[in-house]
Amino acid sequence: MEKKELDWENIGFGYRKTDMRYVANYRGGAWEEGGLTADDTITMSECAGVLQYAQTCFEGLKAYTTEDGRIVTFRPDLNGVRMEDSCRYLQMPAFPKERFVEAVIQTVRANAAYVPPYGSGATLYIRPYMFGISPVIGVKPAEEYQFRIFTTPVGPYFKGGAKPLTLCVSDFDRAAPHGTGHIKAGLNYAMSLHAIVAAHEAGYDENLYLDPATRTKVEETGGANFLFVTKDKKVITPKSSSILPSITRRSLLTVAKDYLGLEVEEREVLLEELKDFAECGLCGTAAVISPVGKIVDHGRDICFASGMQEMGPVTKQLYETLTGIQMGRIEAPEGWIQVIE
């Protein structure tokens, strides 16, 4: 497959239209067959459920060119399972995870010319999403839905390398107890926009959200899970029913335990504990791990031993091992790599 003539090392992290996308419709109580289309437009009623009551969810994953030239994606079955969970919670018909994985494969294969070459630092971002498309004026679920996948080539999330971030402890709540924090609903991200803009205007890179019930426990940021490293190299992640179950975080915990021989623990993490940790990172699809150098809690600086100049040593090991698995340089656990072609 001949690649598109793009400046792969400088394409940035933004949307660029590719040739094909996948579409499937839910009508009459069942999913239609679905398939690929070149049409990137969506036509719907002005009263569509997604427009009136934000009935939508999404996923995010990437396709890579490995060291040996294969095009692969990383654990798409887990994205499919998570999307099924999101759909059920939002009273939407679940798009079966088996069909989800096959749709991802079809879409990436159809856009193989946009999968960046190995070593460029770029990847093909894959965005599956679903929404209520039939008219809804009363507050209730839509009757018809559309599932779609588009792809777009993106450059490294941190151009020039990952520099440690500065976070602030937010006065806003990310999710209510027993709410929607554990699913990937579009409404969660819409609600975080005011808080993230306020943080940026105050000079911070991101927010640290606390549990809304007691405001003493660390939850996550607007779009990533936390990962902490103790001074004796134990890897700890916060446990909460309101945290989105990050596939990257779960994979990093396996890497820490099975590849690096580190002790791992998932438990409640108190805000007051942060001063005792050696390293801190944010886990997500876009950057894998974003190092955190400092957290500001209403004027009190919490600095990590890794400092503000570079990624901490354990965080770096985790990052290099997981990206090595994704790029084919390190043997992956069974089932982690889905070969496209």
Image (spheres, rainbow, N blue to C red):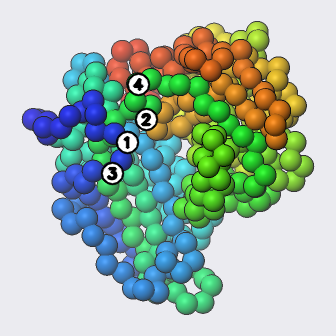
Question: In the structure shown, which secondary structural element does the residue marked by tag 4 occupy?
Answer: loop
Q: Closer to the camera: disc 4 or disc 3?
A: 4
Q: Is residue 230 left or right of residue 290?
A: right
| Label whose residue precedes the other's in the sequence (4 or 3) | 3
Q: Amino acid at mark 1?
A: Phe
Q: Position of residue 70 (x, y in %)?
A: 24, 27
The residue carrying mark 3 is 15
- The quarter of the image holding the C terminus is top left
- Pointer 4: what residue? 160
Going by the numbered disc 4, the residue's amino acid type is: Gly
Residue 157 got which mark?
2
Instruction: Residue 64: give x, y in percent of width and height.
Output: 32, 32
Residues at marks 2 and 3 touching, judged by CB atoms closer than 8 Å: no
Q: Residues within 10 Å of mark 3 (few under 14, many from 20)?
A: few
Q: Amino acid at mark 3?
A: Tyr
Q: Nearer the viewer, residue 130 or 224?
A: 224
| Residue contact between numbered discs 4 and 3, judged by CB atoms under 8 Å | no
26, 132: nearer the viewer: 132
> Disc 2 or 3, which lies upstream in sequence?
3
Q: Which residue is mark 1?
A: 13
* Relative image position of residue 67 (x, y in whole percent): 27, 18
Residue at the image point whose x is 40% and y is 14% from the top: 330
Marked residue nearer the N-terminal end (4 or 1): 1
Secondary structure category for the residue under label 3: loop
Q: Quadrant of residue 296?
A: top right
